[in-house]
Amino acid sequence: MVSLFDLFSIGIGPSSSHTVGPMKAAKLFAERLETQQELARVDYLKVELFGSLGATGKGHGTGKAVILGLMGESPEAIDVDKVDALLQQIEQSEELNLLGKKLVNFGNSGAIVFHRRKHLPAHSNALSFHAHLDNGKAVTATYYSIGGGYIIEEGESTSTEQHNYPYPFDSAESLLVRCKESGKSIAAVVSANEQVHCSTRTISQYTLQIWNTMQACVARGINEEGILPGGLKLARRAPSLKRQLASQQNLSSDPLNVMDWVNLYALAVSEENAGGGRVVTAPTNGAAGIIPAVLHYYHNFVQELDQDAINQFFLTATAIGSLYKTNASISGAEVGCQGEVGVACSMAAAGLVAMFGGNPEQIENAAEIGIEHNLGLTCDPIGGLVQVPCIERNAMGALKAINAARLALRGSGEHKVSLDKAIKTMWETGCDMKSKYKETARGGLAVNIIEC
């Protein structure tokens, strides 16, 4: 089972697999050099990016993330307002301060190599670090960024650590059984399992931190004007949309007006992500706008969120996200955007039903509806940027999640396709999908739309 604290993490945009993961890997490598007492001997560094990281890493900011990680920065703590100045300084000096303790050569040409068509066998997102020492030796390590900011080192097992959880589950079916046997909600089952590691107070503090970060992201996104970085020259749309909605005096004149606000919330977060701002990986950065949009919908148009509702949502969403992470994938480079937007939609739908008081069967049904109608969704970012179609896709995913929740709440929970079958189908569809439709920017919209 995947923990709440792993599934939802605070980081920076534009991509959990291409930015957050590589930054973590770079920091780990630098820390290894220090632990092995080789840091002072490093003369120069070379980093190789493979697969999707090599193909779309420039557009996703992978090179920048690697540099920041080598300097000792972490996704959750870095000051996003200082990133550009730090990178500019390194570009001008062609030197990098490793962990802030050792200046090493880091040329603008050759220090980071983007292998656009070369893959490593273990995963489509791979990066190798080479530290060349002053005694002629080299220290090398390879990491894989497997989605959602998760990283593993070459040779490391991807299996989750085994614990004596009070309510273990590895499928939606077994989760429903645990709920029925115990009389607990899905959120209560997940909470009990989380308490193997931490207190209920720690859980509440973290869910509140996540929600506060999402609110701050929306607030910044609706006020930040300008053009998003990258070759598309895409203008931020959230601020102008906010002005349009704020100028409307009678909100009830159009019964579907709420949809515009949901779109606004999703666009605000997704544009912040595309601009390298601070977001919550939920469960990935490419799909980071969906869950905040759904939560803001509930908070502003249904009922103000309190701590109980916040816990209910995130713990329920954790249960659903855990099933995808362990039984399929949340990596766009591995299964396409169905593993990012589709999974976020599924998680958001489940959490929303929980807040509305739905039973476990209705929650499972909502999660299934959320993914079923995203099956086969490709990942084809134009220019390798998390902008088109990614930003609007978050808005569509949020609205799908709300509708999935409403459909499930109007039903009994009985349905023909189980969530387990839908997850299995998603995985099989992703395995059958051609690599050009999986975050390589070599198929779909990425090749049919000219960057200009």
Image: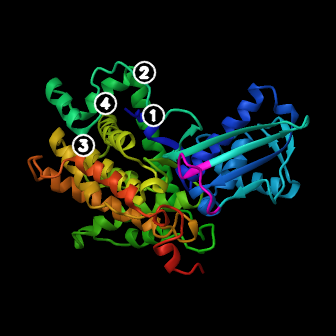
- Amino acid type, label 1: Phe
- Percent x, y of residue 121: 55, 49
Q: Which residue is mark 4?
A: 190
**Residue 184 vs residue 212: left or right?**
left
- Amino acid type, label 4: Val
Q: Residue furthest front?
A: 121
- Percent x, y of residue 446: 51, 73
Label pair 4/3, CB-CB below 8 angstroms = no
Instruction: Measure the C-alpha gap from mark 3 to mark 2.
Output: 25 Å
Residue 411 in view here: yes
Residue at left 26%, top 29%? Answer: 188
- The magenta-colored residue range is 116-126
- Amino acid type, label 3: Met
Q: Which residue is mark 2?
A: 197
Q: Which residue is mark 1?
A: 5
- Percent x, y of residue 108: 81, 59
Q: Secondary structure at mark 3?
A: helix
